[in-house]
Image: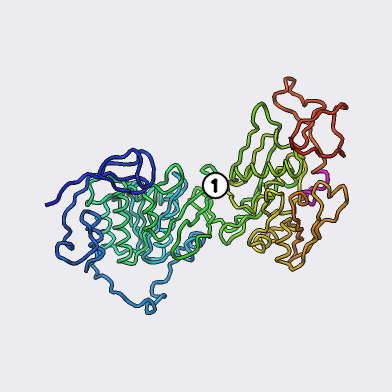
């Protein structure tokens, strides 16, 4: 006879305990233990002495069906062991859905029998994207099943009509029970299944509510069993937590074959599809989409899209070339520096790493003598793109210098490089790909680390041994300009020499008066200048342009 049992499951790691804990003993999360009723009983496989892996209960019954002679809900005999060398790799080729950006992220197409999880913020476009993918696959005559646990069939039909995704071979099932869904898949025998969303699915084997850790794990396991037994790819749409992770136990991501994330600022039109895990392809690829009134549209030329509307030769605007997966993108990095008020200066970064920004401000203040300590600094990556690659350090530094000194860079220049704490420029990877993308969009000059120029050209760029501040005063030799496949490469070893090459000597010699907001008159404080991170007064009411830097040492 079945015996009821109450256990406590952690909502973060699925740890099971016989009593409630304020803090999970396994993962240390607080207030995540939820009481769950479970019915335990002897498994038919276990009672018959079959030697299955069942441990009793709902999960044991599932593992018994996996290890048994016949798959639950599939009507097909279990597979027998075969030699790995004898497996035909071309037996189940990938299926392309017709959306090249989506196929790129998956590694070339949809693999039959794969279980894939896609997550993202609410309203980012997860359901829209997969409904369009399902319609594209159904347009070829293959049957596709869209299982909706959050919308009725009529609501899904209205959304499909708006997206232009009405296809005779696209079927919708408004269902949340995983056993009923498995039976429908067995009857329809579709070429692809979409489950929207996995948090709404529940199993008869558990008494807990949908969305519970146990229900998530059990439902995913049942769907994985169906996907592998019938060679049908299944896409699961997952909710995310406030930290941006897929809601549910971490084991959920381990069970699936691929984990995709749809990212982007909600109020921007561009969306990025990334793969955090992919057993059948690379996790370095990224797909770029644009949200329109007709759904998500592919962006075949993302660099031109991100640079559209850019005003050239404006202080604080620098073009750089980050690499997303195997694709180089050109983006506009913008910075604005304004005199700060009372208290600590403000630092704001949208689309860039705030910690990297703080580091670059410190390097420019210490190594170049720029008075950025009293400045409020705002940085934005135009287009809503989020960049964390260190190769954009030099572009951020240039944007700060350009805004602070009100000097614009040449509109045909692109900047790439990582900046170290000593002010040195470190080489970055995939330089050839970045240069090719910049040349394709009409850029003619690139300022980059000297080590990268040495590597790709075989010509060692001349490097100045003088410090950046003394380079102009002594007239030391600047790096050579090398032409490589139509692009003029300027290799520099330090950020100071890079600033000299891009903006000239005035970028390091000019100073600015401080119009602080705490001045009661609202005007600039006469005779006060910012230099080397300090406030200095000059009896003549200004600062000579040829004065030496003090630095910011105390």
Q: Which residues are magenta?
A: 499-507
> What residue occupies the far front of the structure in this picture?
554
- Say above or below: 51 vs 253: below
The residue lying toward the viewer, choosing from 29 and 449, is 29
Residue 152 screen position, x and y as percent: 32, 47
Considering the whole magenta stretch, tell me its main secondary structure. helix
Residue at the (74%, 68%) spot, across then down: 458
Q: Residue 307: in sight, yes or no? A: no
Residue 440 screen position, x and y as percent: 68, 61
Q: How was the colour assigned to the protein in this rendering?
A: rainbow
Residue 427 falls within the magenta-colored stretch:
no
Looking at the image, residue 221 sits to the left or right of residue 439; the answer is left
Looking at the image, residue 256 sits to the left or right of residue 374; the answer is left
Reading the image, the residue beneath label 1 is 269
Secondary element at tag 1: loop
Residue 506 falls within the magenta-colored stretch:
yes
Residue 273 screen position, x and y as percent: 50, 54
Residue 401 screen position, x and y as percent: 74, 43
Residue at the (75%, 60%) spot, across then down: 489
Residue at the (53%, 57%) spot, across then down: 286
Quadrant in which residue 113 is drawn: bottom left
Residue at the (44%, 49%) spot, across then down: 162
The residue lying toward the viewer, choosing from 27 and 67, is 27
Looking at the image, residue 546 sits to the left or right of residue 319; the answer is right
Quadrant in which residue 255 is drawn: bottom left
Mark 1, other Cα within 10 Å: few <14 / some 14–19 / many ≥20: some
**How many numbered marks appear?**
1
> What residue occupies the far top of the structure in this picture?
520
The residue lying toward the viewer, choosing from 365 and 438, is 365
């Amino acid at each position: 006879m079945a015996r009821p049992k109450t256990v406590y499951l952690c909502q973060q790691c699925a740890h099971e305990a016989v009593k409630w804990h304020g803090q999970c003993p396994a993962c240390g999360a607080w207030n995540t233990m939820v009481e769950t009723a479970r019915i335990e009983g002897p498994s038919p496989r276990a009672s018959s002495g079959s030697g299955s892996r069942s441990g009793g209960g709902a999960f044991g019954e599932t593992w018994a069906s996996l290890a048994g002679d016949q798959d639950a809900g599939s009507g097909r005999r279990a597979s027998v062991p075969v030699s790995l060398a004898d497996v035909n790799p071309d037996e189940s080729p990938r299926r392309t859905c017709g959306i090249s950006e989506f196929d790129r992220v998956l590694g070339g197409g949809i693999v039959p029998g794969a279980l894939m999880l896609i997550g993202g913020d609410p309203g980012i476009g997860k359901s829209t994207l997969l409904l369009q993918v399902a319609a594209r696959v159904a347009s070829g005559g293959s049957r596709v099943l869209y299982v909706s646990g959050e919308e009725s069939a009529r609501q899904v039909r209205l959304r499909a009509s708006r997206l232009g995704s009405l296809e005779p071979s696209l079927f919708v099932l408004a269902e949340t029970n995983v056993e009923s869904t498995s039976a429908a898949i067995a009857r329809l025998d579709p070429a692809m299944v979409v489950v929207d969303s996995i948090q709404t699915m529940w199993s008869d084997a558990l008494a807990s509510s949908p969305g519970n850790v146990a229900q998530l794990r059990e439902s995913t396991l049942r769907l994985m069993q169906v996907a592998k037994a019938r060679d049908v790819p299944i896409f699961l749409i997952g909710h995310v937590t406030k930290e941006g992770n897929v809601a549910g136990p971490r084991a959920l991501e381990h069970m699936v074959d691929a984990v995709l994330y749809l990212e982007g600022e909600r109020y921007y039109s561009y969306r990025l599809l990334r793969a955090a895990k992919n057993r059948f392809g690379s996790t370095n690829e990224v797909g770029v989409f644009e949200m329109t009134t007709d759904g998500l549209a592919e962006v075949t030329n993302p660099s031109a899209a991100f640079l559209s509307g850019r005003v050239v030769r404006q202080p604080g605007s620098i073009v750089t070339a980050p690499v997303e997966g195997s694709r180089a993108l050109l983006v506009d990095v913008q910075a604005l520096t304004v005199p700060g008020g009372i208290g600590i200066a403000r630092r704001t970064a949208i689309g860039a790493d705030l910690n990297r920004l703080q580091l670059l401000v410190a390097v420019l203040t210490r190594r170049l003598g720029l008075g950025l300590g009293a400045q409020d600094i705002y940085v934005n990556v135009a287009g809503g793109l989020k960049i964390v690659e260190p190769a954009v350090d030099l572009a951020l530094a240039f944007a700060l210098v350009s805004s602070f000194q009100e000097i614009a860079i040449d509109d045909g220049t692109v900047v790439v490089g990582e900046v170290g704490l000593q002010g040195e420029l470190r080489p970055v990877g995939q330089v050839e790909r970045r240069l090719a993308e910049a040349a394709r969009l009409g850029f003619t000059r690139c300022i980059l680390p000297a080590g990268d120029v040495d590597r790709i050209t075989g010509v060692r760029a001349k490097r100045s041994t003088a410090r950046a501040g003394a380079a102009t005063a002594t007239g030391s030799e600047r790096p050579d300009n090398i032409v490589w496949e139509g692009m003029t490469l300027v290799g520099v070893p330090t950020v100071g020499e890079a600033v000299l090459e891009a903006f000239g000597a005035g970028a390091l010699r000019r100073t600015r008066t401080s119009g602080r907001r705490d001045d009661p008159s609202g005007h600039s404080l006469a005779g006060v200048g910012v230099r080397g991170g300090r406030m200095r007064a000059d009896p003549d009411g200004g600062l000579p342009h040829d004065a030496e830097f003090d630095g910011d040492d105390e």
